[in-house]
Amino acid sequence: MDLDLDASRVIVTAGAAGIGRAIVEGFLAAGARVATCDIDDAALATLPDGVFARRVDVADAGALTGFVADAAEAMGGLDCLVNNAGIAGPTARVEDVALDQWNATLAICLTSHFVASAAAVPLLRSSENPSIVNISSLAGRLGFALRSPYAAAKWGVVGLTKSLAIELGGDSIRVNAVLPGIVSGDRQRRVLEARAQARGASFAEIEAEAFSHSAIREYVTPQQIANQVLYLASPLGRTISGQAISVCGGTDRLG
Ligand code: NAD
């Protein structure tokens, strides 16, 4: 299948590690030009040559807006924005969540997607295949006990996605969300460990419980998330917009 992405210019937020890194590497392998930002200097330094990389905290709206403009200028335009940034947020009962924790989770998981999209849309209007792909979560389709700030933000990402898809359809800008399930890597291990601690259970018990609601009982890989993102960004996805696509092994409950 030819993704026809070799002339694409792509921005991926928080792309130095994890799922974002797999998305960056997927686009590079498809021949695209790629820009990313992150707060992890050591991970940024390991990105392949040719990636436009900058240290930016996506919670800093001014810095994020400037990064989008500078990255697009360096690449000669913009065809796809991937809003990947997101943090797990606190694992706690709602009465134990501090307002600062709530605000920080929404700033990174949701507001950054709005800020980068607002900066990108005028640039995307000059593209022949413009799209935005937002990384939500299965928590953006299902309730998630002990992770209410994260789930609220991720449902917000889906609402933003569907709204922008309608708003920008007249400009042929497609906007979709990808909802990863239980993805292999450090982040998921930390999330399950925190959940085990909050519930007074073992890691193995919490892991088994998570997979008990999954049709295909295995971890999703970051590369499988990247494959979905690349497809949506490619001309093959030209008639797909406003969709929230789960890549989750058929999971119908969380926690
Ligand atoms: P991760 O925790 O591995 O972090 C990925 C990158 O984000 C890191 O390089 C980190 O330095 C960077 N980052 C963190 N805060 C940042 C900030 N304020 N500004 C800029 N960069 C920042 O995350 P991940 O597991 O790769 O998740 C990527 C996306 O996928 C997130 O939106 C996450 O919510 C979503 N997601 C992940 C899973 C999973 O199981 N890992 C499941 C569902 C959804």
Image: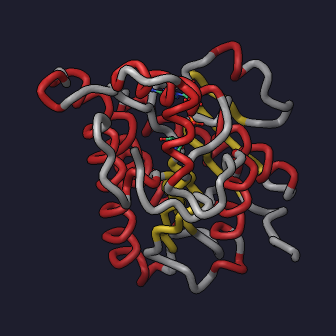
For residue 118, above or below residue 238? above
Q: Which x, y percent locates residue 159? A: 30, 63
Query: Percent position (x, y) of residue 240?
Result: 55, 80
- Which quadrant would the C terminus be assigned to in this image? top left
Q: Quadrant of the N terminus?
A: bottom right
What percent of the width, then of the height, locates residue 26? 79, 51
- Residue placed most toward the observer, 35 or 109: 109
In terms of image quadrants, where is residue 52?
Answer: top right
- Depth order, front residue of 76/206: 206
Q: How many marks?
A: 0
Residue depicted at 23% across the width and 30% down the height: 103
Q: Residue at x 58, y 86 (%)?
A: 239
Front residue (pair 180, 128): 180
Residue lying farthest left? Answer: 95
| Residue 119 appears left or right of 103 | right
| Left or right of residue 147: residue 226 | right
Q: Is residue 190 left or right of residue 152?
A: right
Q: Quadrant of residue 231?
A: bottom right
Q: Position of residue 40 (x, y in %)?
A: 60, 18
The image quadrant where one finds ligand 1 is: top right
In this rendered view, identify the residue nearer to me: 24 or 55: 24
- Say which residue appears at 57% left-offset and 46% top-offset: 182
**Scheme by which the image is coloured:** secondary structure
Q: Would you place residue 32 above or below residue 116 in this image?
A: below
